Image: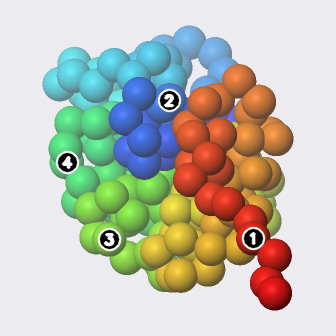
Amino acid sequence: MRIFPCLAAAALLVPGAASASSMVIGSGLARMCYDAAEAERATPGTLDACNRALGEEPLSFDDQVATYVNRGIIRARMNDFAGALSDYDHAIRLDPDQPEAYLNKGALVLKTQDDWRQARDLFDAAIERHTRRPELAYFGRAITNEMAGDLAGAMADYQKASDLAPNWEQPRQELARFSLRKRG
């Protein structure tokens, strides 16, 4: 079973939001890495736990993939964006169906490269692969749709994010900026 901090993506997109981690079952360094990613604790010590888990622990395939995603989240929080992208890419190479890697990479691409086209493709991939946090993927895709000038698509995705996470205020705030008018 995998553990992925899905909230990392949102944290990169929206200050104060959580991230999207990948679950690791059991104990040990990989679990410490997951716990740190999930709790948004990014320190040299938590990064070291992730590094040691990948280099020293006999991890299952799923836990290895999850640990790359989780280490990417920690690296992103430490502003090591190149390292985070490398970890997400490594996770995707190992498991092309890993949704949290796409979600977190999409958020980071949007934040650091302002490449809305690539970010939108990554959010689409996270949705298609059934991310644990689809509200974050829809929210990220809404941002990219808005950047592309697709206001109807943006509005629909903000609404979907709001429907999926009714207690999350940010999508509702974004929706409030839109108004519908009948064409005469």
Please state which amino acid type lies under the numbered disc 1: Arg
Q: Mark 3 near mark 1, Cβ–Cβ under 8 Å? A: no
* Position of residue 85 measured from the top left corner of the image (x, y, whole percent): 34, 60
Q: Residues within 10 Å of mark 3 (few under 14, many from 20)?
A: some
Question: Which residue was labeled with disc 2?
Answer: 18
Placement of the N terminus among the 4 image quadrants? top right
- Above or below: residue 34 compared with residue 179: above
Marks 4 and 2, Cα distance to the nearest angstrom?
A: 18 Å
Q: Which residue is mark 3?
A: 114
Of tags 3 and 1, which is closer to the observer? 1
Q: Which residue is mark 4?
A: 80
Image point (60%, 30%), residue name = 169
Q: Secondary structure at mark 4?
A: loop
Q: Is 73 situated left or right of 179 in this image? A: left
Between the C-alphas of marks 2 and 1, the distance is 34 Å
Label 1 environment density (alpha carbons within 10 Å; few <14, some 14–19, many ≥20): few
In the depicted view, which residue is nearer to us: 106 or 166?
166
The crowd level at tag 2 (other Cα within 10 Å; few <14, some 14-19, many 20+) is many
Q: Mark 4 is on which residue type? A: Asp
Q: Is residue 88 visible?
A: no
Residue drawn at point x = 37 percent, y = 65 percent:
109
Which residue lies under the disc numbered 1?
Answer: 181
CA gap, disc 3 and disc 2: 20 Å
The residue nearer to you, when weighing 80 against 60, is 80
Please tell me whether residue 168 is drawn above or below residue 159 in the rendered image: above
Q: CA distance from mark 1 to mark 4?
A: 44 Å
